[in-house]
Every structure is written in structure tokens, then in C-alpha cells.
Image (tube, rainbow, N blue to C red):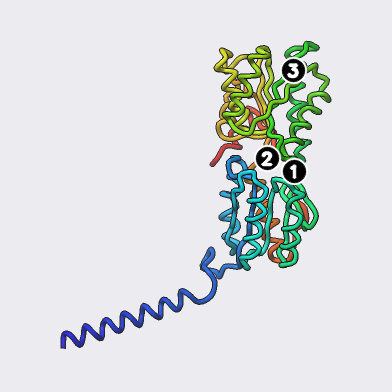
Amino acid sequence: MKVTALIRAAAFATAAAALLSGCASSGGSAASGGATSKGALAMSFPTQDVNIWKQQLDLMQPIVKKAGYELLSDNPNWDIQTQVNDWTSWIQRGDVKAIMGFPVQADSMVSVTAQAKSADIPVIGYAGSWDGTSAKLVLDVKGAGAEVGEAAGKWIKGKFGSQTVEVGLLADTRADLGRLQAAGITEGLKASGANTSVYNLEASSRDDGYKAAQTQLVAHPQTKVWLGIGADMTLGARQAVIDSGVSPSDPSRYVSATDGNDEVYKLIQSGNDIWRETQVWSPEDLAEADAKLLISAAEGTPSGDINVPTRHVTKDTAAGMMSK
């Protein structure tokens, strides 16, 4: 009797497991709130090593999940063919409903964008557009650079009057985003009326920024102003300046950029650091706009272009920009 009972119990357990297994495999994968997944949305940046791009992906995840989608991303590490291959794979998956990206080279994405369009997958541009895109996130990158340049010029005139001041300008010019910001900074300095001598320094990381600033200080030790298009590269330059013997609170030095992070905001908030202000796109603002563009395109109700302005971060506003 005991053996028979055990056999019956085992049979019941097996049947129950089969039933549960069948329920789990039916339909799509689970999304937020137990809803059936609507498919996937894809977001592509040239690299995930840039902090503000990585932050956007992290912030987009819960927004996209709540809307019922899976968020896909890649890391082409500035290689255009890798990025093209990633997009091709997304198109071939069959469940991707929209793709948004910032190409390493926009012209090189035209063919794969046409493939996506043929598969009824809308493609959205980040900070620009190219043939085949249906909408874009609008970032006035040159204008943001001009704001940084003008603010720096105002400070230079107030501190040094008509005296010529040497400026180290750090930028990654491999893509239009960097080239345009650097051009904007230069134009902003000129528009301010400040008397400056600008040295263009190539950098894409903190280490690059440090080395570029070291080299600049050897050749031009009186470089007093440091401007950049990225927080890390500019922090690297700041550290090189300090390691050269300059006090972090030196009143005759000035640092700013078109970017920021918590480390930068704390320096600005102190009100006693050579990094005095910065002009940034908030990761939260960008992530919300990215998600809205992707979701609306996927659901056939495109939102149209979305413009995200920068925020001016000063001693008084830095605390509000820090990660919560």
C-alpha cells in the first residue's frame, strides 16, 4: 500500500509539473506587472564607456519595462562595422519594434537603416538624423559648447581684462558630437570678446585628459583655463593641473565642460574649486526623451522630434543634479 501511494504521489507531482511547465511556455515573456511582452526596443551608442550614455541605458530600463518592452543595447567600442552588425542582428531577431542610435558614422548606417525600414522597424536618431530615420532627439551640441565658451570668456574678462589667456580645449573629435561641441566652445569664447589663445587637445578619457594637460603644461605652463566636452577627460586635466603644483582653489584658474557627474557636481557645490560651473544634459531628461521616442515609434504613434536643452550647473544648483 505504501509503495502504491508513493507511485500515485509521484504521478500526481509529475502531472502537476507538466501542467505548470505548459503554462509557463505559453504566450510571450513576462513584462512589468505580469503583462505579455510587446517585443524589444534597441538603443545603440558608439560605446558604453561614456558615463552619460551608460546612465541613460540604466535609467531607460524601468521606463521601457513598464511599457511592456525589453531594452536591448550594444557596445561597438567606436567600431562602425560592429555597430552595423549589431543593428543587422536586431533586425533579424524578429521581435525588435524600434531602434534608436547615435552612429559612429551616420553615413555608414544608411544601408542598415533601409533594411530596418523594409522590416517595418522605425529608426530614430540620437543627436542627429540621416537618410531613413523617422525622428530624432535634438541636442544643440554646438549651442551647448557656445554656452560653455561664453561663460568662460565672461570669467576671463572679469579676472584678466584684456590680457591674453591661454585655454586648453579637450575634445574627442572622432564623431560629429565632439567636433561640434569643440567648435561651439571656440565660437563662444570668441563671441564673449575675451582675449584668448586656444589650444586644441585630443582626449576621450580621464587618462587622455591628464596626459594631454601634462603635455600642454610643459609647453605652456601658464594655461589657466581648461574646457572640455566630457567630465572624465576634463577631470583628468584638472588633476594634471593640481599635480603641477596649482591649488585646487586657485582663484586664477578655471575649469568647465559640456558634461558633469557627481564628482564634478560636488566640486562645483563646494564653491571653492577651480571647476566653477558646467553645462550639462541631464541623464534623466535624456533617458525620458529616448524612451518616449522609442515607445511611441514602436506603437505607431510617433512623438516627432524631441529637443532636450542643457542645464546650467552652478554652486547653487549642483546639489539638485546629484544622483538620488
Label 1 CA crowd tier, 10 Å (few <14, some 14–19, many 20+):
some
Residue tagged 1? 139
At horizontal 74% and vertical 17% (from top left) the residue drawn is: 156
Question: Which amino acid type is shown beneath numbered disc 1?
Answer: Leu
Q: Are marks 2 and 1 in contact (CB under 8 Å)?
A: yes
Residue projecting furthest to the front:
81
Q: Position of residue 216 (x, y in %)?
A: 66, 18
At horizontal 59% and vertical 57% (from top left) the residue drawn is: 72
Instruction: Give the CA separation, mark 2 to mark 1.
Output: 9 Å
Question: Which amino acid type is shown beneath numbered disc 3?
Answer: Ile
Quadrant where the C terminus sits is top right
Q: Nearer the viewer, residue 167 or 307?
A: 167
Question: Which amino acid type is shown beneath numbered disc 2?
Answer: Trp
Label 2 CA crowd tier, 10 Å (few <14, some 14–19, many 20+):
some
Q: Nearer the viewer, residue 262 or 134?
A: 134
Does dot 3 land on a helix, a strand or a loop? helix
Q: Position of residue 147 (x, y in %)?
A: 76, 31
Instruction: Give the CA separation, mark 2 to mark 3.
Output: 24 Å
Q: Nearer the viewer, residue 93 or 227?
A: 93
Mark number, residue 156: 3
**Figure quadrant of residue 55:** top right
Does dot 1 land on a helix, a strand or a loop? loop
Residue tagged 2? 281
Q: Position of residue 212 (x, y in %)?
A: 63, 24
Quadrant where the N terminus sits is bottom left
Does dot 2 land on a helix, a strand or a loop? loop
At horizontal 72% and vertical 58% (from top left) the residue drawn is: 112
Residue projecting furthest to the left:
1
Is tag 2's residue or tag 1's residue first in the polypeptide sequence? 1
